[in-house]
Each structure stands twice: as C-alpha cells, then as structure tokens.
Image (cartoon, coloured by chain):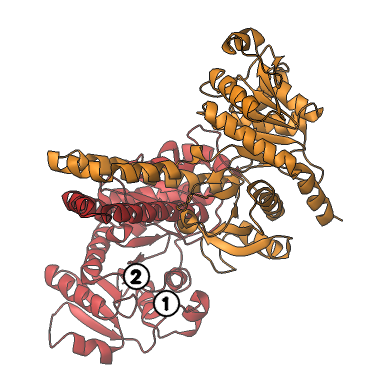
Chain colours: A orange, B red
Amino acid sequence: MRIAIDAMGGDHAPQAAVDGAIAAAEEWPDTTIVLVGDTSVLEPLLQGKKLANLELRHASEMIEADDEPVKAVRRKKDASMVVAGRMVKEQEVGAMISAGNTGALMTTGLLVVGRIKGIERPALAPMLPTVDGEGILALDLGANMDATAEHLVQYAIMGSLYRSKVHGVAEPRVGLLNVGTEAMKGNELTKAAFPLLEQAPIRFIGNVESRDVLRKPCDVIVCDGFAGNIMLKSMEGAASVIFSVLKDQFMRTWYTKLAAAAVKKGLGQFRKKMDYTEHGAAPLLGINGLVLKSHGSSNGVAFKNAVRQARVALKNDLVRSISAEISNGSE
Amino acid sequence: MRIAIDAMGGDHAPQAAVDGAIAAAEEWPDTTIVLVGDTSVLEPLLQGKKLANLELRHASEMIEADDEPVKAVRRKKDASMVVAGRMVKEQEVGAMISAGNTGALMTTGLLVVGRIKGIERPALAPMLPTVDGEGILALDLGANMDATAEHLVQYAIMGSLYRSKVHGVAEPRVGLLNVGTEAMKGNELTKAAFPLLEQAPIRFIGNVESRDVLRKPCDVIVCDGFAGNIMLKSMEGAASVIFSVLKDQFMRTWYTKLAAAAVKKGLGQFRKKMDYTEHGAAPLLGINGLVLKSHGSSNGVAFKNAVRQARVALKNDLVRSISAEISNGSE
C-alpha cells in the first residue's frame, strides 16, 4: 500500500515528517511512503538514505499555518498538502497524512479529494483522552460548527465504523453529548437527534454528560463542532489551572518541594495520558479517501504512528465500509 | 425591605432555611424575612425564638426535587415556592429566595412573577469560580437551552447591570463564549451575536474561549444554556478526575501520604475557591421582581448570604434598572 505524507506541514516541518517517513518505511516494507514537498529541501534531510519504499514527490508551494483555508487550497495548486490530496483523489496513494493547517486540510479533503456519496458533512474525529488511557472518538471536533440531527447520525455511523475497523472495538458504544442523561434533555438539536440515533445501525447508549466523558462512558461521542470545542477546551483549561495551582503549592517551601518529588512521576504519567496530542492522528471521516490530521506539534514518532493508523484503516477498508453503510441507509 | 424565603426547598429543608432566616433577621434589623412553608413544621424549628422582623407564612404544599416543573407550578398553587412567587408579584416582598427545584423556580419566575416588559427570555446567572476567587457571572446557565443573538444581547445587558449594581464592578467587561478569539469565529449564533454585542450599551471585549474562563478574562460571559452547561460540567468533570488521581497518588505509600499533608491545606483552599456552590445564589434575571436560586445543598450560612445579595440588589434597584435599560433599547 502507498501513503503520502505532507512533509511541509506542522511545527517541526519538514524534519519531523522526514524522520517519521524513514522510520515507517523501515518498519513496514510492504508500505511505500511518499514524502510530498520541496525536494530541494527534503533531499538533504534524507542524508543519503536510500529505501526502496520511500519516495519523494516535488511540490513547489506550501500552505502556511495562518493562511485562509479555502483561499489557500484554491490558489496554491502546487502546495504539498494539495498535491497529496490529489494523489488520494487519483488513487495514487490510499491515504494522506498532514500536520499542517487544520482548516486547509479539511478544505483539501472536501474540495480536492471529495466527499463519500451520501455524506453531507465530513467530520474531524480526534480521540479524547480518558482516565483508563483508551480514549473516546469524538466527532465532530472542528470541521463544522453547526450540525443538524442528520449530520449527528452520520457522525455516529462513521465513528462506530472507525472504532471497530481501526481500533478493533466490537460494537462500539455511541453516546450523544448532552446536558443530562434523560432522553428528552437538551437543545433542539439533541432532542431531534436522539430518536434518529435510536433508529440508526449503531449501538446507541443515550445521552452522555460532559462531566462524565473522562470516565469513558462510551467509545464514540457525537456532537456539533461548537459544543465539542467548548467541551475539549473547558477540560484543557481546568486541567491547566489545577496543575499550575498544584505547582505553586509544591514550590512554597523545601518541605513541599520534597512532597512534590514523591508524586511527580505518577502525576507526570497521568498528564501524559490526558494529553490528547499523544492520542494519534485524527481522521477526517466522510471523505472519499483516507485523510489523517496529525497534531501540529507532531514529531517523527507521531508521524510514524499516523502511518500505523493509516495502514490499519487501509487494510480494513474503512472508507469503503463507510460508503456501503451510508448508501444502505439512504436506500 | 421584605424578603421571602421558600422554607421547603433544598436538600436541608426546612432547617437550613430557618437557620438562615434567623441569622439574617438578627443581622439586618431593617429587613423583614418571611419564611414560607408549612407553619406546623416551621414553628417548632424556631424553638420559641421571637424576632420582630421574622414572619411565618403558611403554605400547605411543596414542590419536590423530581416534580415536573411546569405541571408542579400550575397544579400546586399553595406550594411554598409558588406562594413566595405570588408575594413578589403582588409586591408584598421585594425578593424571594429558594433552594428548591431549579426548573420549577424558573417556571415560578416566568408564570407567577412574570417577565420584565421587553425581555424575551429570563436567564439563570450563577457565578463561575475563577482562580482569583472573584468569579465571572455566566448567563444563561440553564434557563433556556437554545438562544437567539438577540437573547444573548439581553443577557449581556442584564449581566452587566447585575455586576455593577450588586457587585460594584465599574463597567463590567462582557465576553461572548466562543471557540476562538477572532471576530468571525464560531457557529451561526455567535457570528450573529458578535456585531449586535458591539452595538449594545455594554463594555463588550469580544470572544472568550472556554479554556481561558478560569483565568477571568471578563466579568460577565454570555452563551446559550446548552454551551454554558457543557462548559461548566466539562470543567467539573476534569477537576473531579484530576483530584481523584491526585488522591490515589498521595495514598500510595507512607512517603506520599506525608507529601499529601504538606500541600493539603493549600489545595483544600483552592478547591473551595473553585466550588461554585460557594459563590452565592444565582439570580434569575429578566423577571419582574427579584428571584434568587440558592444551591440545593445550601445550609443556613448560604441562605443568609443569599439574603445579603438580595438586600444589595433591592437597595440598588436592580430590577428597575434592567427594565429601564431594556425599554431604552427598544425605543
């Protein structure tokens, strides 16, 4: 199988992408990695390394972190991200990975690769960290701020298939993000979505409150992008404040500094488990091809892990499964 | 001035309400407290105490925590909460306080007391805790799940007046809960509300991200009830998980237990500061009279503090100020 990596996107581009590509090519000889970017920059970073399953593809432009997404994708036709998208569209590769501008990547998915027939809105689906270290697939987290009840149902179907095909979760439990657990709780959107989710070909377990999410009440949680963002950033904000207060407490005296040493390791492990940048790349589901968003701060290991995810998704024919399930539903 | 307390609502009813009423009556001789409830229950709790400014008002029914709000308020015409609401409506008292069923109290506000002319949706406005201990007034937090841009503007005006009249904050800064700080970020609701908030007679400081809320970027934050609930419960959930992990870490060995002792006091103070049940009663703003929701777990001190809030609001003519500002805007 063939997987393209946008070498020019992310905080540590292009070095991190090159490192990840080399590591992936060495680990999986059955997979060809295509690094897309300015070859005059990429070539020297390979340091003479020759691998039969590592290719370079030249792209003369790149999309910057602060580029306006739609404009950038439309104008920079030879940007590394756009070229990688075109390779997916033309089935020259099975998947693409980018750590670049999220909005531009979603636009590339929509405009360059294209949607699966019957999907109204593709959704970005990162893993939310949970206490047990396993995580919940949350969608939509950022592709579309507003959603209809029908969109939430499609998110639920796509998220379930991702969890079972890529993570091997049998019959993933799907929850609806809401303000209470009773069936008729919520706003107009969640009230309309609830009965549709009950009818959908998924294992719907009902409403899930945001205060319970970290305890992993379900395997997939669906929400509109606005509510999802508020949830994620509220948790991040609370955690950041608590850890900073904790640090202040520990730094007060020599005695509290000793106390800090006693629990430092355990807390560090917990923080790492709770760091959602550690939970792999987020798929853009609903696109007619596999597009993975790696975190902006991705290093070589993160890129290699994204390749691992892409391989599993390709082996298990994720995109075709989504397409089949969606066209089933619309018959 | 006269303030009614629904003596039958809350987890510790009626004892907590009676304790709070006695303490308030003793502290503020210029204020008459009217305890509303079953006098055959309340009378013995006074233990023979006679205060010139403490009255009992009989109400034969009560609204339970799990009563369906609208039905309960309509049917139980002699419930303590409804009787207190009627006293506000008929200006027999200036304010009412209840720790009972939140939905029923909002219904009492709407149906028994009534809205201020020009207000489309009353809003429940608790204080969110912040790191500095001061807090942010957040509205709407629970009265209405969905909101229009115009509702958010009314929330902003009412919240600003409450902060200045009751908390003495000069020119309170108002933020719009959103997913990014740039002006055009967000969903359809926030995009429509942003320009209206810029025009409103308030000090609008723009969008505020949920991750920054605990750092107190503003004095008032406006949002629809759904997003507000997601924000609050996400923070609660994150805090609860982190403190439970912390506890596990501290309980591991005798050495970590010693470490716990070193920071226990400081962390305890922080948790207390972050506990939103400690931040007083939440006003139901937009009602044509003062209605305060005390937390369900209120003890006597919490009821007394709610009386303190009510006194300040009455002295500063909060309701009339809101009414004047709203009718100004609609001219």
Q: Are marks 1 and 2 in contact (CB under 8 Å)?
A: yes
- Residue B11 located left or right of residue A33: left
Is residue A262 shown left or right of residue B212? left
Instruction: Tell me the chain of label 2.
Output: B
- Are there few (<14), some (14-19), or many (20+) residues within 10 Å of tag 1? some
Q: Nearer the viewer, residue B5 or A281?
A: A281
Q: Which quadrant does the C terminus of chain A fall into?
A: bottom right
A15 horizontally vs B321: left or right: right
- The label shown at residue A256 is none
The subunit letter for the residue under badge 1 reads B
Image label count: 2
Q: Tag 2 or tag 1, which sits nearer the N-term?
A: 1
Residue at the spot x=42%, y=80% of the render? B64
As drawn, the residue found furthest toward the bottom would be B40
Q: Looking at this rendering, what residue extends furthest in the right direction? A: A331
Determine which residue is flagged by label 1. Answer: B65
At label 1, the amino acid type is: Ala
Please identify the quarter of the rendering in which residue A71 is found: top right
Evaluate whether residue B140 shows in this view.
no
